[in-house]
Amino acid sequence: MLSEKIQQALNRQITYEYAASYTYLAMAAYFESLSLTGFAHWFRVQSEEEREHAIRFFDYVNDRGGRVILSAIEEPRNEYASPLDAFEHALAHEQRVTASIHAIYALAVQENDYATMSMLKWFIDEQVEEEKNADEIIQHLKLIGNDGVGLLMLDRKLAERQEEDE
Ligand code: MG
């Protein structure tokens, strides 16, 4: 059985993952509005991945005999000043998700909940990837600056992102 504290933290995390999914879908819409369909595709895949993360937590709470309680998802930001602004927002969001996962891990350590520690390991590694990917694109966008050709080249590259099947 899950402790009440861990259950609450995992339920909150389900909502965070959905909030991330919703934020990335809003970013996909923003990039669609600019006709940057490669960027839009990248965020659509990202949005889908976040829903899968939510379901991983959902399944885990149920597997441990807990009770999933869903909460309201906050309205995402819909407007961005530039592609760089959107990616900086995405990275900041991922950094908050990382902090939240680390906090649940710390709680699991406190409560000697070894199964939760083991489950969270996958997420801890995943967050390293997520932050690295967002940061890399931010660096590229900074290099590109106001160069339209560079932006279109990056758009083509981002269009190639495949959905992960882990
Ligand atoms: Mg996630």
Image (tube, rainbow, N blue to C red):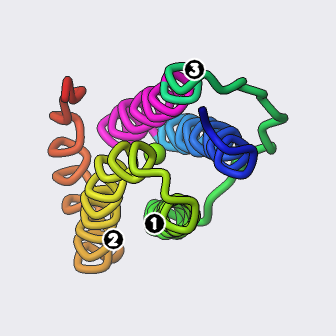
Q: Are marks 1 and 2 in contact (CB under 8 Å)?
A: yes
Q: Is residue 23 visible?
A: no
Task: From the top left corner, tell me how far across and down residue 134 is, in percent.
Answer: 33, 62
Please say if 155 is above or below 65: below
3D distance between C-alphas at marks 1 and 2: 9 Å
Please say if 24 is above or below 136: above
3D distance between C-alphas at marks 3 and 1: 30 Å
Q: Mark 2 or 3, which is nearer the eye?
A: 3
3D distance between C-alphas at marks 2 and 3: 37 Å
Q: Nearer the viewer, residue 25 or 122?
A: 122
- Please give the label number shown on residue 91: 1
Q: Secondary structure at mark 2?
A: helix
Q: Mark 1 or 2, which is nearer the eye?
A: 1
Sequence-earlier tag: 3 or 1: 3
**Residue position for label 3:** 62
Q: Mark 3 or 1, which is nearer the eye?
A: 3
Q: Nearer the viewer, residue 60 or 101?
A: 60
Q: Is residue 10 visible?
A: yes
- Where does the magenta region start and end? 35-59
**Residue position for label 2:** 138
Question: Which amino acid, mark 2?
Answer: Ile
Residue 119 figure quarter? top left
Sequence-earlier tag: 2 or 3: 3
Quadrant of the image containing the N terminus: top right
Residue at (15% x, 34% y) in the render: 160
Q: Secondary structure at mark 3?
A: helix
Q: Are marks 3 and 1 in contact (CB under 8 Å)?
A: no
